[in-house]
Image: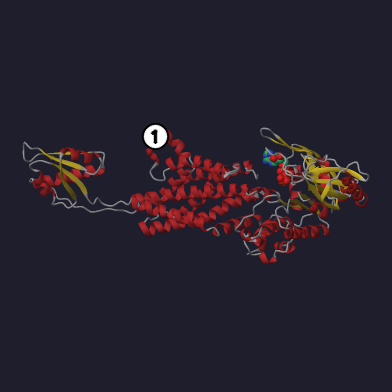
């Protein structure tokens, strides 16, 4: 099976003082027809990586091949077959949706009609509205339509849903699923774990310019050795303070961690652990203020790998 | 329109620019109305009219009143009897053009105080002298007659219009192209374009040509208005003026492309553009002839992009010369356009 994207030991250093090592050795193999997610917190190097793969940035070292071609030499061949949506692009405000797509369509030798692209993102009603008068979600859909209008084999989407309301996000997911069901390949970056779990066949979790883990969402979660989470809080009055890893020695608990007041246990079988936890708390004469159980998510995988949450701000300087 | 031609990236890029431009009322205002305001304001300020009145001060003396009565026969004089000190002050600050001092010792002898470097002053001196001499009995020995000549083409406004056309082409080309490109770069739209198979040369050519499309009506408006308001005429062929406008527009769009080829902020591009334009505002002859600069500077001034453009426009519009007479100017204009466009193609950065 040919790969849609191949890169090996990709590195990117931004010059400056101090220089920033944004990408530090990334290997990726994305298969044709797959929806591949790149997940990671702010500054993880997602945009830098995807822009190198899109041919917009030159890597400091390492080679990237897209759809079987190398960026050095076959750039135009690749560009004819990919569609991209950048993290931040402001399209011309005083052009209508149809005019914008007609412009982009003219760049490609082959593609779908601008009207068809508008239909794929369900913006028929807004075809003649100026970009200026669209909502954030509608603008994002136009951006995706500009990526679709060249009838690409491979779609690059950099945080297409950031800042959108749940309804708009779901609409975009629909567009992505449609594209994939027709055999297209997608590389998407996101902060949202639920989005990645839902859309992606495989995800790579990025942090500090490296891939921490790469697998299908289910395998990553299974890798925790526990697919349930028990979150609880206790009334810690006075000097009483529980250790951060309180509960980790209970039978059936594979890991325990704490964020502020919330304790979290990684477990495989909640019905076994909960009674043990309750009796343990009773022995210590602690009062439980809340207790919930839930399915483990990719967020838990990230927390487990890094000790941080995805939306933690890193440098609070 | 032929569908496949309309879907050519070059045509589409130009079409998008034109739509954006006409949908921006403030841009239309600055491009079309501003040059007109400029023509009207400058035309009125520098309109050449015959001298209507001359302020002449008569220094206080026993005969001052009789001098005044003599001079009052000519209605062009604005007369005033002042003390010596007051008269000197008025002459110095330009409120008086001339001071007439009667020599108290003999009753028909006068002294004129004036500034020979001021045309008004010199005029007042001669006119006053004439009246006083005749009143004292001078007889003209030969008869002369006056016939006023005010040829269109010889006035300041006629000189000014080609300068303003050149200035419009320079400003329009540079700001229009330079700002638009840097704005698209800031909006990351250029980066988005880089991700498509669109060709750089198509993009740059479209930016240049769309600028020409906006420029031509601008110049037409300028020519029509200056003709209606001030009777400014073109002594040469309109085809040649048209050719110069197109080449000049091309030249400055090329310079605008080059200036904007890497700038990342509007401040950076404005700074660069001012740096490029200021020498031409001063030396290329928009408001006065570049001949006034020292000989040493002439070869340099003549090579500036704007100098040959305005020079050729003046030769065509004021003297009615033909194509061959402005050959060297055309070569310089075209040279600037081609070289800057080629350089812009090489240095242009999408991000
Ligand atoms: N042009 C640049 N010059 C210098 N440093 C840069 C540049 N672009 C990005 N960086 C740095 O490189 C690192 C990675 O940035 P990148 O934009 O790839 O992160 P990201 O994962 O896309 O983050 P986000 O989720 O916020 O979009 C960051 O530390 C950032 O500050
Ligand atoms: Mg990013």
Front in this rendered view, residue A176 or B203: A176
Residue A245 visible in the snapshot: yes
Q: In front: B300, or A90?
A: A90
Residue at 20% x, 45% y: name it. B124
Q: Is residue A52 placed above or below A183 in the rendered structure?
A: above
Percent of width and height locating residue A310? 77, 45
Task: Classify the position of the N terminus of chain B by image quarter.
Answer: bottom right
Pick the front one: B321 or B315: B315
Q: Quadrant of ligand 1?
A: top right
Chain of the residue under the numbered disc 1 shown in the image: B
Q: Measured from the top left, where is residue B41 in percent x and y? A: 37, 52
Please tell me how crowded label 1 is: few (under 14), some (14-19), or many (20+) other residues with Cα within 10 Å: few
Q: Is B283 left, or right, of A244 in this rendering?
A: left
> Where's residue A293, x and y in %?
85, 52
Horizontally, is B211 left or right of B309 in the view?
right
Query: Residue beneath label 1, please?
Result: B294
Q: Secondary structure at mark 1?
A: loop
Residue found at the very far bottom of the displayed protein: A125
The number of discs equals 1
């Amino acid at each position: 099976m040919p790969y849609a994207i191949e890169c090996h030991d990709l590195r990117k250093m931004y010059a400056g003082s101090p220089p920033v090592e944004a990408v530090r050795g990334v290997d990726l193999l994305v298969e044709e027809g797959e929806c591949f997610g790149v997940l990671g917190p702010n500054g993880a190097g997602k945009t830098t990586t995807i822009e190198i793969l899109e041919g917009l940035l030159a890597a400091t070292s390492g080679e990237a091949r897209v759809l079987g071609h190398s960026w050095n030499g076959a750039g135009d061949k690749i560009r004819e077959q990919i569609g991209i949506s950048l993290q931040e692009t402001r399209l011309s405000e005083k052009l209508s949706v149809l005019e914008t797509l007609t412009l982009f369509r003219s760049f490609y030798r082959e593609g779908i009609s601008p009207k068809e692209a508008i239909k794929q993102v369900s913006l028929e009603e807004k075809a003649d509205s100026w970009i200026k008068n669209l909502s954030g979600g509608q603008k994002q859909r136009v951006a995706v339509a500009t990526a679709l209008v060249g009838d690409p084999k491979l779609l690059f989407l950099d945080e297409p849903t950031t800042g959108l309301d749940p309804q708009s996000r779901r609409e975009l997911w629909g567009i992505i699923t449609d594209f994939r069901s027709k055999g297209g390949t997608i590389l998407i970056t996101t902060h949202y774990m639920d989005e990645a779990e839902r859309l992606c066949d495989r995800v790579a979790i990025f942090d500090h310019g490296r891939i921490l883990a790469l697998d299908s969402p289910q395998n990553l979660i299974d890798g925790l050795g526990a697919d349930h989470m028990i979150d609880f809080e206790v009334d810690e009055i006075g000097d009483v303070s529980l250790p951060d890893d309180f509960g980790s020695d209970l039978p059936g608990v594979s890991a325990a961690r704490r964020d502020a007041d919330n304790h979290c246990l990684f477990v495989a079988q909640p019905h076994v652990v909960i009674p043990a936890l309750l009796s343990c708390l009773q022995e210590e004469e602690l009062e439980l203020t809340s207790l919930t159980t839930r399915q483990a998510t990719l967020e838990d995988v990230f927390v487990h790998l890094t000790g941080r949450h995805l939306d933690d701000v890193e440098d609070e300087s | 329109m032929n569908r496949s031609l309309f879907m050519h990236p070059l045509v589409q890029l130009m079409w998008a620019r034109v739509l954006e431009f006409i949908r921006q009322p403030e841009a239309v205002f600055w491009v079309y109305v501003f040059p007109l305001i400029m023509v009207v304001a400058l035309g009125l300020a520098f309109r050449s009219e015959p001298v209507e009145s001359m302020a002449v001060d008569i220094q206080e003396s026993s005969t001052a009143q009789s001098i005044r009565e003599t001079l009052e026969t000519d209605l062009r004089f604005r007369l005033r009897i002042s003390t010596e000190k007051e008269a000197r002050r008025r002459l110095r600050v330009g409120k008086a053009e001339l001071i007439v001092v009667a020599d108290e010792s003999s009753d028909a002898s006068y002294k004129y105080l004036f500034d020979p470097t001021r045309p008004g002053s010199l005029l007042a001196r001669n006119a006053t002298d004439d009246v006083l001499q005749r009143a004292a009995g001078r007889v003209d020995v030969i008869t002369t007659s006056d016939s006023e000549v005010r040829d269109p083409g010889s006035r300041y406004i006629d000189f000014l219009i080609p300068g303003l056309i050149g200035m419009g082409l320079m400003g329009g080309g540079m700001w229009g192209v330079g700002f638009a490109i840097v704005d698209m770069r800031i909006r990351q739209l250029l980066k988005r374009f880089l991700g498509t198979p669109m060709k750089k040369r198509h993009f740059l050519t479209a930016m240049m040509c769309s600028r020409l499309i906006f420029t031509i009506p601008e110049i037409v408006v300028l020519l029509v208005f200056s003709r209606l308001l001030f009777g400014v005429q073109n002594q040469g062929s309109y085809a040649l003026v048209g050719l110069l406008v197109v080449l000049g527009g091309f030249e400055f769009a090329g310079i605008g492309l080059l200036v904007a080829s890497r700038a990342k902020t509007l401040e950076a591009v404005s700074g660069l553009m001012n740096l490029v334009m200021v020498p031409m505002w001063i030396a290329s002859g928009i408001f006065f002839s570049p001949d006034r600069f020292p000989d040493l500077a002439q070869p340099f001034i003549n090579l500036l992009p704007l100098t040959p453009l305005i020079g050729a426009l003046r030769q065509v519009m004021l003297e009615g010369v033909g194509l061959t007479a402005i050959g060297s100017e055309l070569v310089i204009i075209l040279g600037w356009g081609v070289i800057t466009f080629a350089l812009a193609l090489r240095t242009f950065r999408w991000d």
